[in-house]
Amino acid sequence: MLDKHALVKRSIAILSADKHLIAYVQMYKPEDSTANFYDILRRHLESYLPDYMIPSYYVCLEGLPLNINGKVDYGALPEPERIKVSESSDSKYEDSILARIFADQLNLESVSPEDNFFQLGGDSLIAIQCVTKARSQGFSISIKDIFAQPTIGALEDFARGNENDNVNRSVIEPMVGAADSSTRNNALKEAGGTENPCIKGSSIENYPLFRGGQEDLYSSINIAQEHYALSPIEDIYPMTAIQQEMLLQSKVQPGRGNYIVQTTFEIQDKSFEFNIFYAAWQEIINRHAILRSQFIGADTRFPVQIVRQTVAAPVELNDWTNKQPDEQLFEYESYRYSDWVNGFDEGICGLSRVKVFKFNNDTYRILWTSHHCIGDGWAQAVITREMVEIYSSISEKSTYNLPTPVPFKRYVSWQAEQDVSLAKSYWKNLLQTEVVSKPLLKTTLNSIGLPEQGKQFEVRRKLSVLKTANLRELAKSQQFTVNLIIQATWALILSRYGNQSRVIFGATASGRPETIEQVEQIVGPFLNSYPVVADLDINKSFIDLANMLKRQQMEKVKFEYISLRQIASWVKSDQAQKLFSSLVIFNNYPKVDVQLGLKVLHHVSQNNYPVTLVVYPSEQIEFVVKYNGFEYKEEQAELLLKHFLDMLDKVMQSPTEALSYFQLANTRNKRQKKLKLKELSL
């Protein structure tokens, strides 16, 4: 955008180590680089770009340094010099509270009235921090005021002229920095001032979805402020029961990686630019409120998500080009694992972070870690697709073409409108006859004293292209889904392993209500687990079994938004996990048109179930059995997966046979023969 200015011949922008955007500019005429060229170029950029993409520093050069290939030599670019602060000693600004705040946030010893906030290196994110600090001390200023009054003196005069500045600071000053924000608010009231801006006007009437009282709302806001106070509050509404359940599991069992989702992308592209990637991710956060949300009070009566107006992209670049390849891989895996098990501290905005590792000039690894409560696999696909689109548009200096995002709040509102009594009646009726959920595998290892981190191991197998095609043809011919056939086959496995004619297991549903407009574009956690009950009459056929599960699926669709914890409470089960001991996950998410050379190297997510069957549909359907590796042996999981695939073969060959026909095959190989029969629930 700078190149479009008539005075600019050529320019580039880079992100410094301290996250400041620096513009290096070559003017057509050196004499044009006057003292006010900074303001001229900044005003020019404000017409095209959002605040966070406007440079903090401008360095005017006679020419950009080039390497032997004629490209910009980034290593030769000079460090920008901070504008020297004025030496004015106007007594009215001595020991100014605002001046101290701005100096602290800009990492300067002091600032003077004539100093320009932006020339000192300020940007929109630092402005947010300054405004928050200033408001906490009784000043009523906004980010807009800083842009309108960029010099410290002008802003001080503006603040002094504001009626809120009449607060007696001698009363408030001792309270600054106190942990109890309600005490600070009361001190402001007693001094004749106003409350903290995040409390002021925070009436339950402003947040109609909030289910608690006024004091409950204040309590939630105060807790949120203790964790993050860099941006005003945009909205407040309840967590969904599913979000609450996942956050509780993470809180009760920290360090286990439960509900922490992690994806590693690799990019092999010399043209990849971190600055553009950072800007694209920032725009993603700006678009989706859930990525700017704090999750407060998961263990209270009124758990809420508090949306902030602005949150900086949690994206960092780590330059590892000076490390050897083996060292890079070792350190990356070590970091990835620790990042996964560490999870997130309560109150962190967005519960997501991105680390970019530069291995060499054309190879980068992107580690994206997030909590499941901000989005499921479908949401990740939406974010990835949007990120690629926005990155490309910035790179090509064009406008991206994406629909206006629908906030997750729309779904929260939809949930509030549902008649829970109907759901309660359905689930109680389905589960009125107790079904014993026998474990698929018997514990063979002593897990006492072993670490809990990363306890979920896995074995995987792919169907051939031909078998995948046959499976899809069977589903098509019977008007089933592939997922339905897999669930019915899993029911057979449970029946044979547990010697039961009635079995129960968990399955997942996308959970996206079709009545919500553009629900497929919403970023949020819709995916839910629910119980599936199967009655296996040995005289009925597999087709009959699948049809029975199909009817059950059709009936439960409108009730699949209910969390397992709620269902468990209705059937008097003390824990949601005790409803069933195995889970089937069919990962059917929107496809992402891979660009930018993105390649998924690694993806991990973990739940609390002893055994999970995960299905990845593609030209060759892949089946993954996840199991507790500190209690079960790999051979047990391998044999279970082998039994399942052999049973699936029988189903595809003879779907009309009676269920008595479908028995476990003798599939033990030499390694598996060593596994004692008692180690399986046969």
Image (cartoon, rainbow, N blue to C red):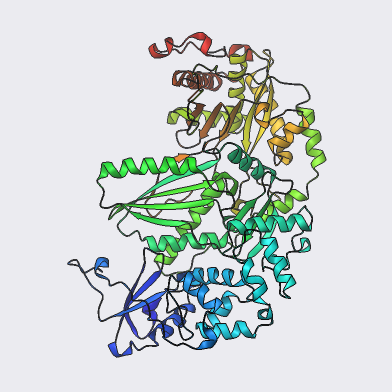
Q: Position of residue 666 (x, y in %)?
A: 48, 10
* Quarter of image, res 398: bottom left
- The relative height of residue 224 versus residue 461 in the rendered view (above or below) is below
- The relative height of residue 284 versus residue 23 in the rendered view (above or below) is above
Residue drawn 48% across and 47% down?
369
* Quarter of image, res 118: bottom left
Q: Position of residue 167 (x, y in %)?
A: 68, 77
User: Can residue 526 be seen at all in this image of the molecule?
Assistant: yes
- The relative height of residue 44 versus residue 643 in the rendered view (above or below) is below
User: Can residue 479 be seen at all in this image of the molecule?
Assistant: no
Q: Position of residue 407 (x, y in %)?
A: 64, 57
Camera-side residue: 552 or 58?
58
* Quarter of image, res 119: bottom left
Residue drawn 62% across and 36% down?
508
Residue drawn 36% across and 63% down?
17
Camera-side residue: 191 or 75?
191
Camera-side residue: 126 or 429?
126
Residue drawn 25% across and 66% down?
75
Q: Is residue 609 left or right of residue 281?
A: right
Q: Is residue 265 left or right of residue 497?
A: left
Q: Which quarter shows the N terminus?
A: bottom left
Residue furthest out toward the bottom? 31
Q: Which quarter shows the C terminus?
A: top right
Q: Is residue 525 left or right of residue 102?
A: right
Q: Position of residue 517 (x, y in %)?
A: 67, 55
The count of marks equals: 0
- The relative height of residue 621 versus residue 91 in the rendered view (above or below) is above
